[in-house]
């Protein structure tokens, strides 16, 4: 989940040593990584993904997007049909097509933890406004800006949206979104992590001061690790691609990892390699090289 624009740095990570094992799985972010800025998948990239699958390398889309925004790549999930959505909060089977997806795994944010995060962040950064992302519903506060090009199911204060008797209370919360109209994005991220502590995992994928808050320990990396373990694939056999702070853990975990040419400085520091920008088909460039080396 990302808006295009300039990025800034929060904290730098240690560089990941590259694995020498042949890859068995490719894990790629979408916005700013696999997708071009117009949200399209280029013909070159489509061909590279298909060639990887044909060569026996699984491709997983690992994104901050909710499942309902996955129609842009639902034609390219190949045999397994799975994608990791919501920064690791859900594994989704996209075989049914747009609007017919099935949740295979859900790693929810407990409402108690969500309420704690809302309270602590309101105290630390007055003016913060919230939205709540659930498995099928999207709810927001009245002051939350129109960032997502969709109509929310309900407008109400976050405390009401997360109450035990709220509409949709039987539906798991995947993440909450916290927006501040004035703070620097990385300063907001640092402040939020200090304020909330281990009650939740906090990251960002937008150049604006928009944070994504998930359950403790939930990240792209941890859910990808679960999916790989189910397939008997080690982290050393994974090649990962990303461009924003919500990709850092995944890039650090993977045996080979590539920061896009347009990546945030933290991503460049975390990755073991670098490719060209998303608009120049940076993911396809690396996949083509991997397949050429195997032939």
Image: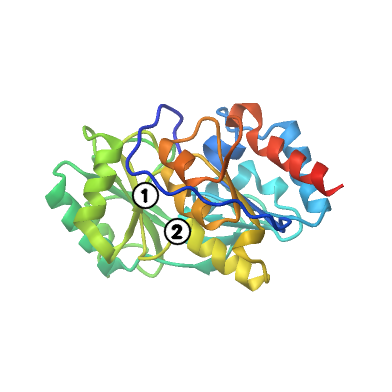
The residue at the point 87 percent across, 47 percent down is 295
Q: Is residue 279 above or below residue 80?
A: above
Q: Is residue 281 above or below residue 257?
A: above
Check disc 1 and report its element: helix, strand or loop: strand
Residue 61 appearing in the image = yes
Q: What is the spatial separation of the Cα atoms under label 2 and label 1, in whole angstroms? A: 9 Å
Answer whether labels 2 and 1 touch (C-beta < 8 Å): yes
x then y, percent, for residue 143 = 23, 39
x then y, percent, for residue 53 = 78, 52
Pick out the residue farthest to the right: 295
The residue at the point 19 percent across, 52 percent down is 121
The one of 108 and 50 positioned closer to us in this rendering: 50
Q: Is residue 192 above or below residue 108?
A: above
The residue at the point 21 percent across, 32 percent down is 182
Circle 1 Cα neighbour tier, 10 Å, few/some/many (<14 / 14–19 / ≥20): many
Q: Can you tell which quarter of the image residue 279 is in?
A: top right
The one of 15 and 286 positioned closer to us in this rendering: 15
Residue 154 appearing in the image = no
x then y, percent, for residue 239 = 64, 51
- Left or right position of 99 against 288: left
Residue 203 is labelled as 1
- Which residue bears the numbered disc 2? 219
Disc nearer the start of the sequence (2/1): 1
The one of 24 and 295 positioned closer to us in this rendering: 295
Check disc 2 and report its element: helix, strand or loop: loop
């Amino acid at each position: 989940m990302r808006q295009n624009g300039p990025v800034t740095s929060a904290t730098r990570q240690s560089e990941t040593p590259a694995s020498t094992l042949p890859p068995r799985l490719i894990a790629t972010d979408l916005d700013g990584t696999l997708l071009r800025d117009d949200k399209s998948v280029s013909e070159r990239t489509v061909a590279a993904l298909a060639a990887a699958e044909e060569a026996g390398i699984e491709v997983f889309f690992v994104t901050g997007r909710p499942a309902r925004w996955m129609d842009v790549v639902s034609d390219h999930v190949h045999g397994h049909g799975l994608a990791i959505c919501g920064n690791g909060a859900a594994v989704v089977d996209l075989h049914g097509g747009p609007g017919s997806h099935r949740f295979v795994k859900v790693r929810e944010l407990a409402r108690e933890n969500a309420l704690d995060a809302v309270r602590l962040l309101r105290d630390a950064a007055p003016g913060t406004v919230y939205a709540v992302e659930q498995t099928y519903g999207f709810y927001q506060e009245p002051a939350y800006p129109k960032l997502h090009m969709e109509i929310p199911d309900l407008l109400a204060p976050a405390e009401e949206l997360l109450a035990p008797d709220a509409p949709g209370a039987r539906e798991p919360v995947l993440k909450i979104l916290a927006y501040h109209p004035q703070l620097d994005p990385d300063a907001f991220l640092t402040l939020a992590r200090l304020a909330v502590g281990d009650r939740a995992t906090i990251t960002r994928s937008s150049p604006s001061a928009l944070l994504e808050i998930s359950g403790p320990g939930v990240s792209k990396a941890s859910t990808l690790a679960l999916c790989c373990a189910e397939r008997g694939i080690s982290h050393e056999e994974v090649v990962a691609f990303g461009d924003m702070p919500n990709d850092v853990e995944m890039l650090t975990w993977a045996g080979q990892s590539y920061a896009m040419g347009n990546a945030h400085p933290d991503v460049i520091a975390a990755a073991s390699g670098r490719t060209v920008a998303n608009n120049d088909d940076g993911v396809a460039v690396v996949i083509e090289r991997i397949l050429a080396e195997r032939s």
